[in-house]
Structure formats: C-alpha cells, structure tokens
Image: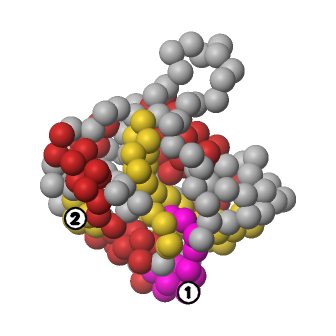
C-alpha cells in the first residue's frame, strides 16, 4: 500500500484544497504560534497565511518554509532531520526532538486517510511520529483534509478525531464522522471552492475566527 506521488497529490482536489487552505488560514489570528506539518493541503494553508502578521511558524515541511520565509512578519523555524526526497518532508527523531521543544497555539495537520471510526491515518511511521509530537505540543489542533481522504485507507495511525478541535474540509461529513465531531465538540468548517473564479469574495465560513490561548 503506497501513497500517491507528491506531484500527483497536488492535482487531486486542487480547488478544494485551495478553499480549505483559505478557510483554515482565516481561523488563525495574527500574533500566534503554530505548527504546520506535511501535506499538499497544509501547504495551501501556508500560502493563505502570507498576509498574516507576527506569526511564529514551526514546520517539518520544506515547502511550507519556502512559502513563508520571505515574509518579514512571519518567523519560520524548520525542524532538522532527514529530508524525504519525494516531498520535502523532514522526518525522524531529530525533527521530533525539535518539535517537542515548543508549545504552540495551533497545529495545522493533514492526513492521508480518515476512516469511519474517526482514525487519522498515514503511510510513513516516521512522518506519523512527527505529527503525533505536533499534536501533543499544540493547544488547539486543526485538521485540514478534503473529502477524498474519507474514501482512502492507510496503515499507520496518527491520532483520532477526538484529539482535534477544528476540522476544515470541503463537503458534508458522513453520518458517523459527523456524529463523532458533534459529540466531541469539534468545529467543522465546510470550505467550498468558488463557483465563479471571477468572484472576489473571500471563502465563506459560518465559524468565527479562533483566538489564541
């Protein structure tokens, strides 16, 4: 069982990922600290954060670092470790050790698959170790994942939906997952791609922006 190649993943649900990225970034206030981990959807969040001010971003994703480091009001710290050539991920014990030195306001995480019982899944156990450290060291965790992830499977468990506070996706959830989110008090944001690309309105969301704790 293997994940899609990185360049191929960039084109899967591309419009949905961009809408998710914009909606997720809208929940992040200026002046906060956050983790951003591996994934094409988390990279869309990073792209949408470039107009934010006074952010501290810790990431194990070289693509995220390259998107953000030029912006003078965003400080970027990159986790060390082995660089995975396929997608620019920094993985392994060195990355986990660096992540564990921080306690941040928000974590922005992705997943390769989400099963009907609410398990968040991925393919590389080394990547999962970094993701678990990110979750453990954030005050609020935001999952960003498009609805294709609900139809996939992967062998390594990252976490459970009950460990996140906000789920940004692009379509209504299946009944089982919707019930998990409701009973656990997880805020669900449906970010739909714009029907008209010439529409300059921001991505709409019925959830008010979060506040750093």
Q: Nearer the viewer, residue 115 or 9?
A: 115
List x then y, in percent, for residue 196. Answer: 56, 13
The disc placed on residue 156 is 2
* Residue stretch rendered in magenta on the structure: 95-107
Q: Earlier in the sequence, mark 2 or mark 1?
A: 1
Q: Is residue 33 above or below residue 148?
A: below
Indicate the quadrant where residue 204 lies. top right
* Residue 106: in magenta span: yes
List x then y, in percent, for residue 111. Answer: 34, 54
* Residue 195: in magenta span: no
Q: Which residue is mark 1?
A: 101
Q: Is residue 30 above or below residue 130?
A: above
Q: Secondary structure at mark 1?
A: loop
Q: Nearer the viewer, residue 71 or 185?
A: 185
Let me know if residue 90 appears in the view: no
Q: Residue at x 56, y 80 (%)?
A: 103
Let me know if residue 211 appears in the view: yes
* Horizontal relation, residue 14 to residue 147: left or right: right
The total of numbered circles placed on residues is: 2
* Horizontal relation, residue 153 to residue 14: left or right: left
Which residue reaches farthest right? 72
Q: Secondary structure at mark 2?
A: strand
Q: Residue at x 51, y 15 (%)?
A: 195
Q: Nearer the viewer, residue 7 or 166?
A: 166
* Horizontal relation, residue 167 to residue 176: left or right: right
Indicate the quadrant where residue 149 lies. top left
Inter-mark Cα distance, 2 to 1: 24 Å
Mark 2 vs mark 1: give the one in front. Answer: 1
List x then y, in percent, for residue 209. Answer: 59, 50
Dot 2 alpha-carbon crowd within 10 angstroms: few under 14, some 14 to 19, many 20 or more: some
List x then y, in percent, for residue 97. Answer: 49, 86
Q: Is residue 128 above or below residue 3?
A: below
């Amino acid at each position: 069982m293997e994940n899609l190649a990185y360049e191929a993943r960039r084109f899967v649900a591309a419009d949905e990922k961009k809408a998710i990225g914009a909606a997720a970034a809208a929940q992040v206030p200026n002046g906060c600290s956050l983790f951003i981990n591996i994934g094409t959807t988390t990279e869309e969040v990073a792209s949408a954060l470039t107009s934010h001010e006074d952010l501290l971003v810790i990431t194990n994703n070289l693509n995220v670092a390259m998107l953000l480091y030029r912006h003078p009001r965003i400080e970027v710290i990159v986790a060390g470790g082995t660089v995975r050539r396929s997608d620019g991920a920094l993985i392994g014990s060195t990355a986990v050790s660096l992540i564990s030195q921080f306690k941040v306001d928000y974590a922005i995480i992705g997943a390769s698959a989400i099963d009907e019982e609410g398990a968040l899944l991925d393919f590389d156990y080394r990547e999962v170790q970094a993701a678990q450290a990110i979750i453990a060291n954030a005050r609020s965790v935001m999952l960003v994942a498009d609805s294709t992830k609900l139809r996939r499977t992967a062998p390594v468990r990252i976490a459970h939906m009950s460990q996140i506070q906000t789920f940004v996706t692009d379509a209504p959830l299946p009944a089982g997952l919707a019930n998990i989110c409701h009973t656990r008090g997880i805020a669900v944001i449906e970010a739909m791609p714009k029907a008209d690309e010439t529409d300059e309105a921001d991505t709409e969301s019925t959830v008010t922006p979060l506040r750093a704790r």
